[in-house]
Image (tube, rainbow, N blue to C red):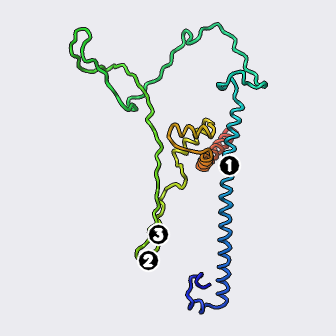
């Protein structure tokens, strides 16, 4: 009994009876708390699994609803698959105009990127005159410009942290290294979270579409449950800025009402 309390036999014998009773009661309470803690941990793990399952089901339901809303006008499905309730829009009446740009319409072309934003410049200069064959020198200050844009190949970057536990050769104690300051305890960090949040929030992409897009574009393997977890993390991170923006708008609105009477 006294060994469990970290006391020696001599100290235990010299401890007053009332203090012994209090220590034993506290020890019993700690044991009960440990049992309850283990039970709560199991319940929490079960709840997390249920939440992940519910998130997966929500994603599946959203995808099914998206499929049900498809018809021949908003997808590649043939008209024969349209449900009886679907009523296509009537075709537009011809206006007697030809297809394409109309007379007087100003054409639109892609604007050139400013020179300071160009990554590479390749000067193409003729070497000899096409008429007499004389070697040509100099540069054309009004050279015709043509820009070609390409996206750099991007792959997911995975950093693995390995916490070592080492045994002291003097006292035999085992010490484990601490996690570095600022290391996220989640599997996906800021940039990956931002992309997932942008795809789901701005474009309304389904969880399965996000999983496919992240795998194809970045080689990042996600599950639909991970997409739901990232959505919760992004929502929590944006909570304070959104509240601040809402308060600012309310203050501006109140100020406008006061000024305009």
In percent of the image, x 71 and y 21: which residue is there? 79
Q: CA distance from mark 1 to mark 2?
A: 47 Å
Secondary structure under the numbered disc 3 in the rendered image: strand
Q: Compared with residue 186, is residue 115 higher up or lower down, i.e. above or below? A: above
Which dot marks residue 171? 2
| Quadrant location, the N terminus | bottom right
- Residue at the spot of label 3: 175
Q: Compared with residue 201, is residue 35 higher up or lower down, i.e. above or below? A: below
Secondary structure under the numbered disc 2 in the rendered image: loop
Q: Can you give x and y, in whole percent of width and height, for residue 175 in the image?
A: 46, 69
Q: Can you give x and y, in whole percent of width and height, for residue 40 in the image?
A: 68, 64
- Residue at the spot of label 1: 53
Q: Can you give x and y, in whole percent of width and height, for residue 170 in the image?
A: 41, 76
Q: Compared with residue 11, is residue 47 higher up or lower down, i.e. above or below? A: above
Relative side of 170 to 108, left or right: left
Relative side of 81 to 195, left or right: right
Judge by depth and name the residue closer to the eye, 208 or 261: 208
| Quadrant location, the C terminus | top right
Q: Quick check: can you spot residue 110?
A: yes
Relative side of 83 to 132, left or right: right
Question: Pointer 3 and pointer 1: residues touching (CB < 8 Å)?
Answer: no
């Amino acid at each position: 009994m006294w060994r469990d309390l970290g006391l020696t036999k001599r100290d235990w014998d010299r401890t007053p009876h009332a203090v012994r009773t209090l220590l034993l009661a506290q020890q019993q309470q700690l044991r009960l708390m440990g049992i309850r803690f283990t039970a709560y941990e199991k319940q929490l793990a079960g709840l997390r699994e249920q939440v992940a399952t519910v998130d997966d089901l929500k994603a599946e339901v959203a995808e099914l609803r998206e499929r049900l809303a498809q018809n021949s006008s908003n997808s590649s499905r043939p008209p024969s698959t349209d449900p009886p309730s679907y009523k296509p829009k009537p075709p537009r009446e011809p206006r007697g105009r030809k297809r394409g740009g109309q007379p007087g319409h100003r054409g639109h072309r892609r604007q050139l990127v400013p020179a300071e934003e160009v990554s590479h410049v390749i000067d193409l200069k003729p070497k000899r005159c096409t008429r007499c064959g004389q070697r040509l020198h100099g540069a054309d200050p009004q050279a015709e410009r043509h820009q070609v844009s390409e996206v750099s190949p991007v792959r997911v970057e995975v950093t693995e942290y390995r916490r070592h536990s080492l045994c002291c050769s003097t006292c035999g104690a085992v010490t484990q290294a601490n996690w570095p300051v600022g290391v996220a305890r989640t599997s996906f960090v800021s940039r990956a979270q931002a992309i997932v949040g942008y795809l789901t929030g701005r474009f309304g992409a389904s969880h399965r579409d996000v999983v496919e897009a992240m795998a194809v574009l970045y080689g990042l393997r996600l599950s639909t449950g991970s997409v739901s977890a990232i959505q919760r993390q992004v929502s929590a991170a944006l909570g304070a800025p959104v509240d601040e923006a809402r308060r600012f708008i309310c203050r501006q609105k109140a100020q406008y009402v006061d000024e305009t009477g």
